[in-house]
Each structure stands twice: as structure tokens, then as C-alpha cells.
Image (cartoon, grey):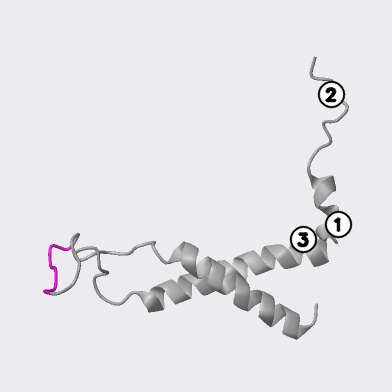
Amino acid sequence: MNWVSFIALFFVTWWLVLFAVLPFSLRTQDEDKDVTLGTVSSAPRGPHMLRAAIRTTIVTAIVIGIFYGLTRGLGLGFDDIPHIVPDFSHIDGH
């Protein structure tokens, strides 16, 4: 994989992981019992994007590391996906 493909894969994975990580450790104004006038009570309390970005980067690095280990270390690819799942066709089921 060349460096342009790696950066593209990291970028796409980072955005996917961001939406998965974003709700973690989010405190709402209602939970803190301090609702700002003109906002909904479920609005986030204070900025938390820096922490979310750091967590996202760490989780993305782990995911990309696992992907790299599977593709480069074990030599697996998309053609190997059917061979990962065990073949149960020989079981009759009767």
C-alpha cells in the first residue's frame, strides 16, 4: 500500500470512528443541572471535541494497525474472506 492510499484509508476510517466515539463521556446540560437559556437540555455541556478527536485518533491507529497486521503480517486480503468463515455445507442438518 502506498502512502497516498494509507492516508486515504486513515482519513475515511478516522471519520467513521469519530461518529462511533463521539457520544462517549458526553455530559449534557440536563445532567449538570445547568441549562443555558435558549438551548435544549440535551445540549452538550462544555467543549469536548478535543478529547473526542484524541480518542478517535488512538482508536483509528489501533484499527489501522490491526488491518495492517492482517494484510501485511498474515497476508490476508479480500479474497480470503470466504475462507475465514467455516464451511458448514457438509453438515446435513437432518
In 3D space, how far apart are the residues under numbered discs 2 and 1 (Cα atoms)? 24 Å
Q: Are marks 3 and 2 in contact (CB under 8 Å)?
A: no
Residue drawn at x 19%, y 64% as measured from the top left: 41
Instruction: Look at the numbered disc 1 and give the secondary structure of its residue.
Output: helix
The local crowd at label 1, few if under 14, some if 14 to 19, many if 20 or more residues have their Cα within 10 Å, is few
Q: Label 3 sits on what residue type?
A: Leu
Q: Label 2 sits on what residue type?
A: Ile
The location of residue 76, given as percent across then percent down, is 83, 59
Give the residue pinned by disc 2.
Answer: 91
> Quarter-wise, where is residue 66 in the image?
bottom right
In 3D space, how far apart are the residues under numbered discs 3 and 2 (Cα atoms)? 30 Å
Q: Label 1 sits on what residue type?
A: Asp
The local crowd at label 3, few if under 14, some if 14 to 19, many if 20 or more residues have their Cα within 10 Å, is few
41, 65: nearer the viewer: 41
Instruction: Look at the numbered disc 2 and give the secondary structure of its residue.
Output: loop
**Segment tinted magenta in the rendering:** 32-37
26, 41: nearer the viewer: 41
Residue drawn at x 34%, y 74% as measured from the top left: 48
The circle drawn on residue 58 is none
Screen quadrant of the N terminus: bottom right
Instruction: Look at the numbered disc 3 and give the secondary structure of its residue.
Output: helix
* Looking at the image, residue 18 lies above or below residue 3: above
First in residue order: circle 1 vs circle 3: 3
Please give left or right for residue 36 compared with residue 18 in the image: left
The residue sitting at the top extreme is 94
Give the residue pinned by disc 1.
Answer: 79
In 3D space, how far apart are the residues under numbered discs 1 and 3 (Cα atoms)? 13 Å
**Magenta stretch contains residue 71:** no
The majority secondary structure of the magenta stretch comes to loop
Q: How many numbered marks does the figure carry?
A: 3
Please give left or right for residue 82 compared with residue 60 in the image: right
The circle drawn on residue 70 is 3
